[in-house]
Image (cartoon, coloured by chain):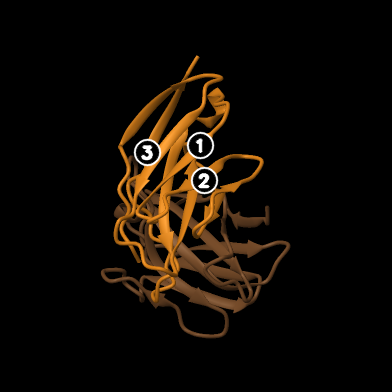
Chain colours: A orange, B brown
Amino acid sequence: DAKTTQPPSMDCAEGRAANLPCNHSTISGNEYVYWYRQIHSQGPQYIIHGLKNNETNEMASLIITEDRKSSTLILPHATLRDTAVYYCIAYGGATNKLIFGTGTLLAVQP
Amino acid sequence: GAVVSQHPSRVICKSGTSVKIECRSLDFQATTMFWYRQFPKQSLMLMATSNEGSKATYEQGVEKDKFLINHASLTLSTLTVTSAHPEDSSFYICSARAFGGGANTEAFFGQGTRLTVV
């Protein structure tokens, strides 16, 4: 499965949009981009996933570049409860494993 | 989203004893379940992949005789930490993907089990 690269940490003001980038330059054609988040001492929570097209649900939007080498998770109106570690994962290769990288610690500031 | 229940959420055991952790998919059938371990301030590390009715596949460096995984049904997988030692103290998390779910089907996670070996 393709390796992903994320900034280790980001800050965001409460009420503003949080844009979390992810690089996955070696992603293969059949791998999806998945986003999960983990709030301290809890299991990861599914956010959104996509293959080629941009996706939106009640939690977030996922923007995937045309060449699929990078993506951005957008939380439109961040709240304090969105403070968490966000993981971007490229999944769907032959190994069928969901492998977590180091993620981005998003701190939403009041 | 679908619900994955993990039990217990927290357990303290004495060194040398065994501990069993259960992972249940409550509203869907899971062909595949994953077991992770997470140490403080670190990411999740995949330990093994559990397939219903067959032997689990362990990641390199994970002792299969120490971490026994059983996936007896489409809704239940168990992880038994045998002869636990203080270094096994960690946060253990399970994940399940729906039956027939390929890469376009999200996996859901349990709430985790905090194991402390004293």
Compare marks 1 and 2 and give the one earlier in the sequence.
2
For the point 58% across and 63% down, which residue is it?
B22
Give the camera-side residue of A107 and B34: A107
Residue A58 on image: x %, y %: 66, 40
Q: Marks 1 and 3, Cα distance to the nearest angstrom?
A: 13 Å
Q: Which mark is residue A104?
A: 3
Residue A72 on image: x %, y %: 44, 42
Q: Is residue B113 depicted above or below A41 in this figure?
A: below
Left or right of residue A81, residue A10 in this image: left
Q: Which residue matches tag 2?
A: A62
Give the residue type that dot 3 points to: Thr
The chain containing the residue under callout 2 comes to A
Q: Is residue A77 depicted above or below B78 in this figure?
A: above
| Residues at marks 1 and 3 touching, judged by CB atoms closer than 8 Å | no
Q: Which residue matches tag 1?
A: A74
The chain containing the residue under callout 3 comes to A
Determine crowd level at label 3: few under 14, some 14-19, many 20+ residues with C-alpha closer than 10 A: many
Give the camera-side residue of A20 and B5: A20
Determine crowd level at label 2: few under 14, some 14-19, many 20+ residues with C-alpha closer than 10 A: many
Left or right of residue B76, residue B58 in this image: left
Placement of the N terminus of chain A among the 4 image quadrants: bottom left
Give the residue type that dot 2 points to: Leu
| Residues at marks 1 and 2 touching, judged by CB atoms closer than 8 Å | yes
Give the camera-side residue of B49 and B19: B49
Q: Is residue B14 visible?
A: no
For the point 35% across and 62% down, which residue is it?
A27
Give the residue type that dot 1 points to: Ile
Q: Is residue A33 depicted above or below A41 in this figure?
A: below
Residue A105 on image: x %, y %: 38, 34
Q: Marks 3 and 2, Cα distance to the nearest angstrom?
A: 16 Å
Residue B101 on image: x %, y %: 60, 71
Left or right of residue A32, residue B88 in this image: left
